[in-house]
Image: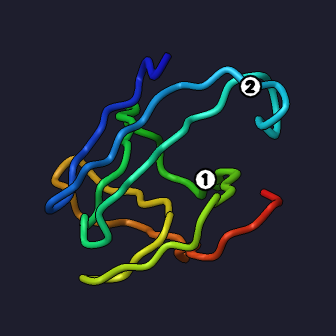
Amino acid sequence: SLEGWSLVSGFCSTLTARSLASSTDALFGKTLLYMKETVSNSGDAGVYQLTNMLSEGEYTFSAYVRLLTEIVGVNGTPGVFLKVTDTSNNVIAQSERITEKSDEY
């Protein structure tokens, strides 16, 4: 299930996201988050998770990502990325964007 995660749609987005049980495709464990977008100018569509406020300090956020197709964008900068925001939606940190297909994570 996608418990704890919410879908956010970008401009003209057709993004779908679902939990997928697959011990052969998941890098760790038996479940993965499968996302599919069919519109090239969908903006910042994706999934997000709210967390409790973290105490001051340095943190590392990471994700294992594997793209099944190249990502081509029309508007803005395409790609899969992590973004950390505060409660006012101010961006605190954002990772590089991954756009190239790969058979590995």
Q: Say which residue appears at 53% left-offset and 71% top-offset.
A: 95
Would you say the residues marked 2 and 1 are in contact, meaning their CB atoms lie under 8 Å apart? no
- The numbered mark, 2 or 1, whose residue comes first in the sequence reads 2
Q: Which mark is residue 61?
A: 1
Say left or right for 54 vs 70: left
Is label 2 or label 1 in front? 2
Q: What residue type is labelled 2?
A: Ser
Q: Say which residue appears at 16% left-offset and 53% top-offset.
A: 88
Say left or right for 22 vs 41: right
The percent position of residue 51, horizontal first and vertical second, equals 40, 33
Q: Residue 15 carries which label?
A: none
Q: Say which residue appears at 63% left-offset and 76% top-offset.
A: 100
Q: Distance between the residues labelled 2 and 1?
A: 24 Å
Task: Report helix, strand or loop for mark 1.
Answer: loop
Q: Say which residue appears at 75% left-offset and 67% top-offset.
A: 102
The chosen color scheme is: rainbow
Say left or right for 22 vs 45: right
Q: Name the residue under label 2.
A: 22
How many residues crowd around disc 1 within 10 Å: few (fewer than 14), some, or many (20 or more)?
A: few
Using the image as rendered, state which of residue 46 and residue 58 is in the foreground: 46
Using the image as rendered, state which of residue 87 and residue 44 is in the foreground: 44
